[in-house]
Image (cartoon, rainbow, N blue to C red):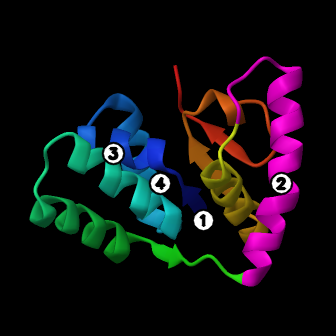
Amino acid sequence: MVVYDTYAWIEYFRGSLKGRIVKKLLEENGYTPTIVLAELSRKYFREGFTADEVRKRLQFIQLKTIIVPISIELSIKAAEVYSKLKAYARENKLRTPSLADALIYSTALNQKDKLITGDKLFKNLDSIIYIGE
């Protein structure tokens, strides 16, 4: 199975070519970190979606994937991963990672699965299915 990040879900709901890759992977289910639900909610509210429209999308995600909560172990892993991501980003002249980035990537590492993303921050890291560009 795979872990879906915010980028992957945005492309899925757009119905883009990248979103079709996500749709194909959804046949195997997978995981979605809770922080992704919050990021999607914020994005769609900024774009003028109603609460009902946002809720329907989040409920769809909940039906299609296992929602992974932020646990103590995931929090510790994310703190460790954040330091590594930050050093990697600086070294490769990429944007500074967020705590959400560390939580999402740590979810994939903890699940021993791959993260599907189009975020350039993750492009050359282990356990990534990159759909960007």
Can you tell which of label 3 and label 2 is closer to the viewer? 2
Closer to the observer: label 4 or label 3?
A: 3
Marks 3,1: beta carbons within 8 A: no
Q: Residue at x 80, y 50 (%)?
A: 82
Q: For mark 4, what is the residue? A: 25
Is the Cβ of the residue at disc 4 closer than 8 Å to that at disc 2?
Answer: no
Horizontal and vertical percent position of residue 67: 49, 76
Dot placed on the residue nearer the N-terminal end, 4 or 2 = 4
Give the image quarter of residue 60. bottom left
Q: Is residue 33 visible?
A: no
The amino acid sitting under disc 3 is Tyr
Percent coordinates x, y for residue 2 in the rendering:
59, 60
Mark 3 or 2, nearer chain start = 3
Against 86, residue 63 (above or below) is below
Mark 3, residue position:
12
The amino acid at mark 4 is Leu
Question: Which sits earlier in the primary sequence, circle 4 or circle 3?
Answer: 3
Is residue 94 located in the magenta-colored stretch of the structure? yes
Disc 4 secondary structure class = helix
Q: Is residue 58 left or right of residue 47?
A: right
- Mark before the other along the chain sequence, 3 or 1: 1
Dot 3: what SS?
helix
Q: Which residue is mark 1?
A: 1
What is the spatial separation of the Cα atoms under label 4 and label 3, in whole angstroms? 11 Å
- For mark 1, does the 10 Å Cα neighbourhood hold few (<14), some (14 to 19), or many (20 or more) residues? some
Q: Which residues are magenta?
A: 72-96
- Quickly name the residue at label 2: 81
